[in-house]
Image (cartoon, helix red, strand yellow):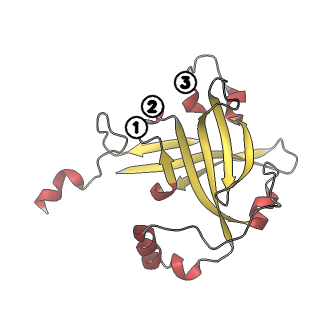
Amino acid sequence: GTGFGKVSWSFQKNKKDGHPMIEAVDPLAYYFDPSATSRQDSAFEIHRVERTLSQLKKNPNYKNLKNLQISQSAAKSAWETRRDAVTGKAALEIQGKIEVLEFWGKFAPEEDGDEEEFLITLAGNETVIRLEKNPYLEMAVDDVVDDVFYRPFFIMKHADVPHEFYGVGMVEPIEKLL
């Protein structure tokens, strides 16, 4: 099995104090470079969430919100729909949410420029509401040479599989015995 998580910092109103936050990331809401065999190989990582317009407006990092169209919830796969029905989430789901894709990865801001680590947030599949160099790079230390380590994600694997992004789950080695 493979689990995904995200680390961030919750700032207080004075913008100086705060605390770290760790959240579990739904494996169906985490996307990575399909050619990657590890996070270090991945040119990008994307986290998909749904937010209301008022939630987006509360985040001072988001701009260009006036053109957003509130639509129905983002399309879900059949597996996500079944899972939500079993857990009861489908009954509680509120319409009026906007799909938000948070892209962390290599991006060339100019056509002929070099790729750099960026954070790009896209809302409603068409509106860029955040575009900036990866803010975690400001904390870079000299001995870390790979910028991918400044992305906020981490991966937990029960058992690693060489040259594969996903690990082996706890049941997989004995599933033929069941």
Where 70 falls versus 32 (above or below)?
A: below
Percent x, y of residue 85: 45, 79
What's the CA distance linking mark 2 and mark 3? 10 Å
Where 56 falls versus 16 (above or below)?
A: below
- Assess whether mark 1 and mark 2 are in contact (beta carbons under 8 angstroms): yes
Q: Which residue is mark 2?
A: 41
- Assess whether mark 3 and mark 2 are in contact (beta carbons under 8 angstroms): no
Residue found at the far top of this picture = 142
Q: Residues within 10 Å of mark 2 (few under 14, many from 20)?
A: some
Answer with mark 1 or mark 3, whichever residue precedes in sequence. Answer: 1
Q: Nearer the viewer, mark 2 or mark 1?
A: 1
Picture quadrant where residue 82 is located: bottom left
Where 88 falls versus 126 (above or below)?
A: below
- Secondary element at tag 1: loop
Picture quadrant where residue 171 is located: bottom left
Answer with mark 2 or mark 1, whichever residue precedes in sequence. Answer: 1
Residue drawn at 88 percent across, 46 percent down: 14
The amino acid beneath tag 3 is: Asp
Answer with mark 2 or mark 3, whichever residue precedes in sequence. Answer: 2
Residue found at the far bottom of this picture = 91
- Secondary element at tag 3: loop
In the picture provided, is 28 more to the left or to the right than 162?
right
Label drawn at residue 46: none
Q: Which residue is mark 3?
A: 146
Residue drawn at 54 percent across, 39 percent down: 44
Where 106 falls versus 87 (above or below)?
A: above
Picture quadrant where residue 141 is located: top right
Residue drawn at 17 percent across, 58 percent down: 175
Label drawn at residue 35: 1
Residue found at the far right of this picture = 14
Percent x, y of residue 129: 75, 51
